[in-house]
């Protein structure tokens, strides 16, 4: 099973999971690129799905569905089903509310497509207003194998790494990660996220110490999450 990444708008990312005959489009805003790719590979688009129901992630749905025999499955359906089958391969679905109530992640072949739940270096905004649920979703992701490849819904790597450097997180790890950065292929490993993503280090003393210098509360991981969001300003 292969994963193909496409960029659209300025920083949004589309994914195509496919085998030799069938494909799944996730957040398929890069419609023309998808059509060109599936035509070249002679693939059948079987499903059109999303990581969550925000307009910048769903703009390609109607065109993809109208031009193919693909089936649409909502995030709620997928969260209930817990997996999606493609060519006898199981794509696992993780319910990860926080950014939105319907946020989900797709896990296959050691890769996790995370939408706006987890980016490379930061996390999405908490539009649900329930930060404790968001923290629990991040813990669910954190429990996966450290070698898991994180494929996000946006390319926010450069501002996220600047934010991390501004707050005294391991500069060497950040510089090493940035050397591998390419706008043509946006990814990280879960191990890297645990090293340079402040929101994946809520329990770490150095994060709490830094936030205390800003006179921000860190009594719980939820408070720490909220406090980090208060200082997360990208220049």
Image: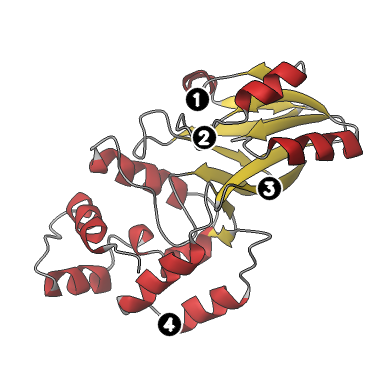
User: If you read the primary sequence from the N terminus, does the residue marked by circle 3 or circle 1 appear first?
Assistant: 3
Q: Mark 1 points at which residue?
A: 75
| Residue appearing at x 55%, y 79% in the figure | 176
Judge depth for marks 3 and 2 and give the one in front.
3
The span from disc 4 to disc 1 (Cα, nearest Å) is: 37 Å
Badge nearest the viewer, 3 or 4: 3
Measuring from the top left, give residue 14's x and y in whole percent: 63, 42
C-alpha separation, residue under disc 3 versus residue under disc 1: 21 Å
Q: Name the residue under label 4.
A: 171
User: Which disc number belongs to residue 211?
Assistant: none
Q: Which of marks 4 and 2 is nearer the N terminus?
A: 2
Mark 1 burial class by Cα count in 10 Å: few <14, some 14-19, many 20+? many
Q: Which residue lies at the image location 38% right of the left edge and 42% below the top edge?
A: 137
Picture quadrant where residue 64 is located: top right
Measuring 37% from the left and 58% from the top, which residue is drawn there?
A: 200
Within 10 Å of disc 3 (Cα), the crowding (few <14, some 14-19, many 20+) is some
Q: Are marks 1 and 2 in contact (CB under 8 Å)?
A: yes
Q: In this view, does 197 lie to the left or right of 145?
A: left
| Residue 150 percent location from the top left of the image | 56, 53
Distance between mark 4 and mark 2 Cα atoms: 31 Å
- Residue 21 drawn above or below residue 147: above
Q: Which label is found at residue 51?
A: 2
Most extreme residue toward the left, as rendered? 215
Residue at disc 3, secondary structure: strand
Where disc 4 sits, the SS reads helix
Distance of mark 3 from mark 2, alpha carbons?
15 Å
Residue, disc 3: 6
Question: Taking the image as drawn, is residue 123 in sight?
Answer: yes
Mark 2 crowdedness (10 Å alpha carbons): few <14, some 14-19, many ≥20: many
User: How far apart are labels 3 and 4 at the CA level?
Assistant: 30 Å
């Amino acid at each position: 099973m292969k994963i193909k990444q496409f960029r659209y708008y300025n920083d949004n990312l589309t994914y195509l999971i496919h085998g030799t005959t069938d494909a799944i489009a996730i957040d398929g805003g890069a419609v023309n690129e998808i059509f060109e790719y599936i035509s070249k590979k002679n693939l059948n688009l079987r499903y059109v799905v999303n990581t969550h129901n925000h307009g910048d992630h769903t703009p390609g749905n109607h065109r993809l569905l109208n031009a193919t025999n693909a089936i649409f499955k909502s995030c709620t359906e997928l969260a209930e089903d817990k997996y999606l089958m493609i060519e006898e391969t199981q794509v696992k679905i993780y319910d990860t509310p926080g950014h939105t109530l319907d946020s989900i992640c797709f896990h296959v072949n050691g890769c996790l497509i995370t939408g706006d739940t987890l980016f490379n270096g930061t996390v999405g905004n908490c539009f649900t207003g329930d930060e404790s649920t968001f923290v629990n979703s991040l813990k669910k992701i954190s429990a996966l194998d450290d070698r898991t490849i994180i494929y996000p819904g946006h390319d926010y790597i450069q501002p996220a790494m600047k934010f991390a450097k501004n707050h005294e997180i391991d500069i060497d790890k950040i510089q090493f990660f940035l050397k591998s950065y390419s706008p043509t292929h946006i990814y990280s490993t879960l191990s890297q996220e645990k090293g340079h993503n402040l929101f994946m280090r809520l329990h770490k003393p150095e994060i709490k110490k830094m936030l205390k210098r800003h006179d921000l509360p860190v009594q719980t991981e939820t408070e720490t999450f909220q406090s980090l969001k208060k200082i997360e300003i990208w220049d």
